[in-house]
Image (spheres, rainbow, N blue to C red):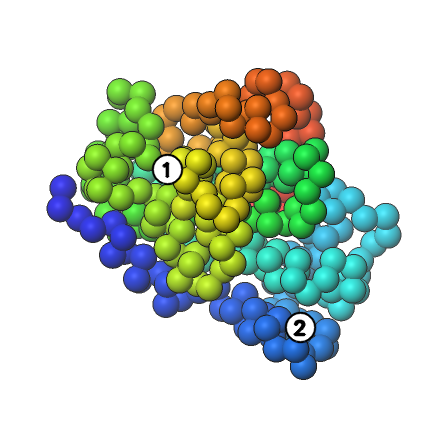
Amino acid sequence: MAVDIEEAVKDWVDSPPHVYVKLKKTLEDPRSSFKEFSSIIGNDPALSARLLKIVNSAFYGLESEVETVTHALGIIGTEQLTQLVLATSVTKQFSGIPENLVSMDLFWRHSIACGVTAKIIADWIGERNLENYYLAGMLHDIGSLIIFKKFPVEAEKVLTRCRDKKECLFDVEREIFGSSHAKVGGKLLEGWGLPMSLCEPVYFHHRPNKAKDYPLVTKIIHVADSIVDEMNLGSSGEAIANSVSPKILDELGFDELPIVKFENQITDQYYSAMSVFL
Ligand SMILES: [Fe+2]
Ligand SMILES: [Fe+2]
């Protein structure tokens, strides 16, 4: 199959989520103020409403009700809010993907479940900046959407083979395309100018030992991906769960895949995140 899946990234790199890009520019300008952030977000009423819903949900667990975007900025900060804008915008960005390959609803459920699970594991380990874990989980398979959209016929063959032979998508893609959804996704996010703390876990979520600068978040995404596949939360088209090596589990402080340990927490946060992100 002579298709270059990495080429497909070009079509998407030029159209990053619009509001996110503006916020990021504002974030990088030391002279910018809260007021500028709120007015960029305020220009998109649907986005403002979604953000307030997220900030007031169990996802944040705040005690008092947040009623305005400015108030939300004061509580969770400009950087975190910018990341949330990205999380909520990408689901809108990728519409029109052929539903015969993977249902979009199931795909985002898988992504949200992985984000929530990564955040729970990171919290248990004592990490800060949990949004980075959520976002890396939410975006880890985004390369697949580009492949589905650009090469639906080839993608269907790959998915069918994975299902029939119970093979790992990443391995079959590498055999057939010479590249993978992990690499395509990583390139997309890098092209959008996202920090390497997000790009690296996406690049290496199937081979976490390759991560150089962000091994912890990469390993956590790898483990979270496997947990949500075992728990059957959504689907990215993958026929089998990642098999996680005992070494990686040990490095994170587990003696087995921590499904039982986190199951209740994952289920609670998954349903609450779905109600606000989808
Ligand atoms: Fe994947
Ligand atoms: Fe996945």
* Between discs 1 and 2, the one toward the N terminus: 2
- Alpha carbons under labels 1 and 2: distance apart: 36 Å
Residue 206 locus on image (x, y percent): 40, 35
Residue at the left extreme of this rendering: 2
Q: Is residue 43 visible?
A: no
Q: Name the residue under label 2.
A: 37
Residue at the bottom extreme of this rendering: 31
Label 2 C-beta lies within 8 Å of the nearest ligand 2 atom:
no
Camera-side residue: 83 or 96? 83
**Residue at the (49%, 60%) spot, across then down:** 194
Camera-side residue: 177 or 122? 122
Q: In which quarter of the image is the N terminus?
A: top left
Determine whether the residue tagged by mark 1 lies in a helix, strand or loop.
loop
* Figure disc tally: 2
**Residue at the (46%, 52%) spot, across then down:** 199
Residue 164 versus residue 202 in the image, above or below: above
- 1 or 2: mark nearer the eye: 2
Residue at the right extreme of this rendering: 64
Side of 171 where 226 appears, left or right: right
Query: Label 2 amino acid?
Result: Phe
Res 187 quadrant in image: bottom left
Q: Which mark is residue 102?
A: 1
Camera-side residue: 215 or 7? 215
Side of 223 where 16 appears, left or right: left
* CB-based contact (under 8 Å), mark 1 and mark 2: no
Res 107 quadrant in image: top left
Residue 120 locus on image (x, y percent): 66, 35
**Tag 2: Cα neighbours inside 10 Å, few (<14), some, or many (≥20)?**
many
Determine whether the residue tagged by mark 2 lies in a helix, strand or loop.
helix
Query: Label 1 amino acid?
Result: Val
